[in-house]
Image (cartoon, rainbow, N blue to C red):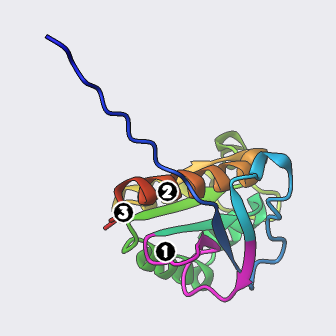
Amino acid sequence: MHTIIIVRKIKMSKFSILCDSREKKPFTFASDRFSSHNNTIVTKLDQGDYSLVGYENIACIERKASIEEIYSNLSSNEPRERFYREMERLSSIKYPFLVLAVDADQIMTGCEFSRASPVMIMSMLLGICMKHKINVIFAGRSAEFITYKILEKVWKEIQENKNPL
């Protein structure tokens, strides 16, 4: 008895990344490590800081660039309320991510510009993960690379399934 195996090769076209125009120091995705995408388009995004062209309502990444930004967003009433509203909007996305350009140890060390408790800040971040089903990534100095790899992985998933919803 012979077995026939059919291998289906899917040609992955390159993708384009969207970057919110309000990002203060946007990722460039310029090195050779980022060769799978065509370009980065700067535009106003309704939610998040990074997404894929044509799939803004499927994949979205909110980035926090520094320990100061994280503490600022979570320790004061008005910024915290705004941040929670952002997370609520993000929770409607199939692939929602919060990429932090710090590691967990930095969160737990605290921020010299805030009197907020590191335990409270970490609890809030974990609460966002649990309540809103948002993937919280402590990316540290690899935030640009991890953001790119998330978008690349989502793009491949979309291409392989042709129906990401």
Q: Amino acid at mark 3?
A: Lys
Looking at the image, tell me whether mark 3 or mark 2 is earlier in sequence order.
2
Q: Position of residue 117 (x, y in %)?
A: 62, 55
> In the image, what residue occupies the spot 53% across and 69% down?
60
Q: Is residue 79 magenta?
A: no
Q: Would you call the spot at circle 1 few (<14 residues within 10 Å), some (14-19), or many (20 or more)?
A: some
Taking depth in this image into account, of 78 and 16 the one nearest to the observer is 16
Q: Quadrant of residue 133?
A: bottom left
Taking depth in this image into account, of 163 and 127 the one nearest to the observer is 163
Magenta span dominant secondary structure: loop
Residue under label 1: 55
Asked if residue 102 can be seen in this view, the reply is no
Distance Cα–Cα, label 1 vs label 2: 10 Å
**62 lies above or below 9:** below
- Residue segment shown in magenta: 40-58
Residue under label 3: 162
Tag 1 secondary structure: loop
The quarter of the rendered structure image containing the N terminus is top left
Distance Cα–Cα, label 3 vs label 2: 12 Å
> In the image, what residue occupies the spot 75% across and 63% down?
65
Q: Which mark is residue 154?
A: 2
